[in-house]
Image: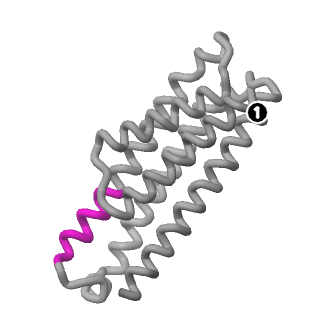
């Protein structure tokens, strides 16, 4: 049991770190995003070790995870495209020409989408979570903590890289 959890956490940590690094270096392709999403789904499902009765709740969760991942990919691609459209003027040029009201509207729209996606994910998880045994709930909590730690490490790594790039 512990080996399954450890393997799942290791796989997810590698996937999160690899994804964060790849994003910092270049844009991921649609196939890369799909592979990353598949890995995340498989890790969570393997860690939970669902019973046959619980399996019936899984398709809604997987659908919500995939929709959330697709919306995130779209937001990142749109942001990357917006930066590319700004041209070679650099960050100062982009900031000087930025319309703060438009930026607030875009940010509000992105937050609304993220909020909706998270609500849909929570709604999808609710029926399954009510059927989870205590050990499954512990594995789910442990996996959540491991993911948060991996994401935090990836964010910190990106900050270091950004600082190193500024010094060059």
* Residue bearing the label numbered 1: 137
- Magenta segment boundaries in residue numbering: 76-87
Could you say which is closer to the camera, residue 91 or residue 100?
A: 91
Q: Quadrant of the C terminus?
A: bottom left
Q: Residue at x 67, y 45 (%)?
A: 144
Is 47 included in the stretch rendered in magenta? no
Q: Does the image show residue 116? A: no
Q: Position of residue 105 (x, y in %)?
A: 38, 68
Left or right: where does residue 84 sit relative to residue 33? Answer: left
Q: Residue at x 46, y 30 (%)?
A: 63
Q: Residue at x 17, y 77 (%)?
A: 87
| Residue positioned most to the top | 52
Is 86 included in the stretch rendered in magenta? yes
Per the image, label 1 sits on a secondary structure element best described as helix
Q: Image quarter for residue 139?
A: top right
Q: Main secondary structure of the magenta part?
A: helix
Q: Position of residue 120 (x, y in %)?
A: 54, 38
Q: Is residue 28 above or below residue 7?
A: below
Could you say which is closer to the camera, residue 114 or residue 44?
A: 44
Q: Position of residue 2 (x, y in %)?
A: 75, 32
Left or right: where does residue 26 sit relative to residue 147? Answer: left
Q: Image quarter for residue 109?
A: bottom left
Q: Is residue 152 above or below residue 14?
A: below
Q: Residue at x 76, y 33 (%)?
A: 137
Q: Quadrant of the N terminus?
A: top right
The colour style of the image is: one colour
């Amino acid at each position: 049991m512990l080996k399954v959890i450890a393997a799942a956490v290791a796989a997810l940590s590698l996937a999160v770190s690899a994804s964060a690094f790849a994003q910092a270096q270049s844009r991921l392709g649609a196939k890369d995003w799909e592979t990353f999403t598949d890995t995340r789904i498989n890790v969570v499902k393997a860690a939970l070790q669902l019973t046959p009765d619980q399996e019936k709740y899984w398709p809604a969760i997987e659908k919500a995870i995939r929709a959330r991942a697709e919306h995130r990919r779209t937001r990142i691609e749109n942001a990357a495209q917006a930066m590319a459209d700004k041209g070679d003027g650099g960050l100062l040029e982009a900031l000087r020409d930025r319309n703060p009201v438009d930026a607030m509207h875009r940010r509000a729209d992105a937050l609304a989408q993220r909020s909706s996606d998270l609500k849909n994910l929570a709604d999808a998880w609710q029926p399954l979570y009510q059927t989870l045994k205590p050990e499954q709930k512990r594995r789910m909590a442990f996996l959540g903590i491991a993911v948060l730690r991996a994401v935090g490490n990836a964010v910190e790594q990106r900050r270091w890289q950004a600082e190193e790039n500024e010094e060059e």
